[in-house]
Image (cartoon, coloured by chain):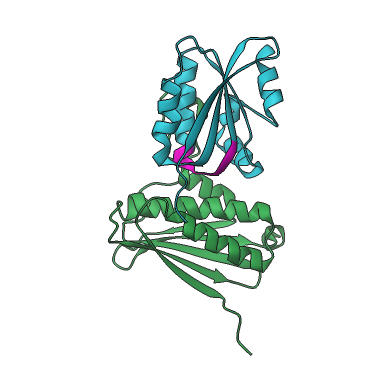
Chain colours: A cyan, B green
């Protein structure tokens, strides 16, 4: 029962209005060991990235240290004027994200279509 | 006829990631008692955070020091003790302030004790460095009835 290494796939997509959207798809566990995957991948995004979708549908285990990394990503994104939408969290982690207040800074959408559409509003 | 087992003890190395063993075992025990999946997820997160605290703060990542996880089945509740060799928590759980975190006025970490206290029905932090400090967590099958 080892920790599952975090993998991230970066995909380019579009919002409903045709604007470019970068989707970060996480697979595995998100823990204190995920700094390179979460923050390193974010820091490697091209300059000019404005819209980011976080896809947690491949994540089964996310602890408070992992949530702290997500918060650090959100801090950096806020400083850069980037917008973040989120989807794919399991119901339990929707509850945990809500408890710690992250929902004040990113909306947790039911699916990717809704997440991408939210950039238009 | 064999008596049902009501007490389980696991020893974990003080290595981050080992908490998943305790999560899995606790989920199996809780499931056998009839807890629903939502409560089991709450329990798993609470145990994970208690183990991480024990590994990082109690045993200071010293892999030669074990973290003990003791599961005790009651008639209507499951008690979990997570034991380490440290001094016990030096502060109370802090409710995270996301605005302060986003403005870097509060550390982005430090949410573990808050999550534990929010997700289970009863928590006790016991400081006993000579015999093992521990967190005691309880979840109940019918929490509303217990509180009434």
Q: Please state the horizontal and vertical placement of residue B61, each as a whole percent of the image.
A: 30, 52
Please determine whether, in this image, residue A87 is positioned above or below residue B140.
Answer: above
Please determine whether, in this image, residue B30 is positioned above or below residue B62.
Answer: below
The verdict on residue B110 being magenta is no
Q: What residue is rendered at 46% in x and 13% in y? A: A80
Please tell me in which quadrant of the rendered image residue B85 appears.
bottom left
Q: Please state the horizontal and vertical placement of residue B25, each as a whole percent of the image.
A: 53, 63
Between residues B136 and A118, which one lies in front from this camera angle?
Answer: A118
Between residues B121 and A6, which one lies in front from this camera angle?
Answer: A6
**Figure label count:** 0
The stretch in magenta equals: A57-66
Q: What residue is rendered at 51% in x and 64% in y? A: B80
Name the quadrant of the C terminus of chain A.
top right
**SS assignment for the magenta stretch, majority:** strand
Between residues B31 and B100, which one lies in front from this camera angle?
Answer: B31
Please tell me in which quadrant of the rendered image residue B68 appears.
bottom left
- Can residue B102 be seen here? no
Please determine whether, in this image, residue B139 is positioned above or below residue A79.
Answer: below
Q: Please state the horizontal and vertical placement of residue B74, each as a whole percent of the image.
A: 60, 72
Determine whether, in the image, residue B23 is placed left or right of residue B144. Answer: left
Q: What residue is rendered at 50% in x and 55% in y? A: B47
- Can residue A60 be seen here? yes
Please tell me in which quadrant of the rendered image residue A72 appears.
top left
The verdict on residue A62 being magenta is yes
Please determine whether, in this image, residue B43 is positioned above or below residue A107.
Answer: below
Q: Please state the horizontal and vertical placement of residue B114, each as a whole percent of the image.
A: 50, 44
């Amino acid at each position: 029962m080892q920790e599952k290494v975090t993998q991230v796939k970066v995909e380019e997509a579009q919002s409903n209005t045709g604007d470019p959207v970068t989707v970060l798809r996480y697979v595995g566990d998100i823990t204190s060991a995920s700094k390179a995957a979460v923050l390193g991948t974010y820091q490697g995004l091209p300059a000019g990235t404005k819209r980011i979708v976080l896809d947690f549908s491949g994540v089964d285990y996310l602890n408070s240290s992992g949530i702290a990394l997500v918060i650090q990503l959100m801090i950096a994104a806020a400083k850069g004027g980037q917008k973040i939408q989120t989807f794919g969290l399991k119901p339990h982690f929707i509850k945990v994200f809500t408890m710690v207040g992250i929902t004040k800074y990113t909306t947790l959408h039911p699916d990717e279509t809704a997440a991408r559409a939210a950039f238009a509003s | 006829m064999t008596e049902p087992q009501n007490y389980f003890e696991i020893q974990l190395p003080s290595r981050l990631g080992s908490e998943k063993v305790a999560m899995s075992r606790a989920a199996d025990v809780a499931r056998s008692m009839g807890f629903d999946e939502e409560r089991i997820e709450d329990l798993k997160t609470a145990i994970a955070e208690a183990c991480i605290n024990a590994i990082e703060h109690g045993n200071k990542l010293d892999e030669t020091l074990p973290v003990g996880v003791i599961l005790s089945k009651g008639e209507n509740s499951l008690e979990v003790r997570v034991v380490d060799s440290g001094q016990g928590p030096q502060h109370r759980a802090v409710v995270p302030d996301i605005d302060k975190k986003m403005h870097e006025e509060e550390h982005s970490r430090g949410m573990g004790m808050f999550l534990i206290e929010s997700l289970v029905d009863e928590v006790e932090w016991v400081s006993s460095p000579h015999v093992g400090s521990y967190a005691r967590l309880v979840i109940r099958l019918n929490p509303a009835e217990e509180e009434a």
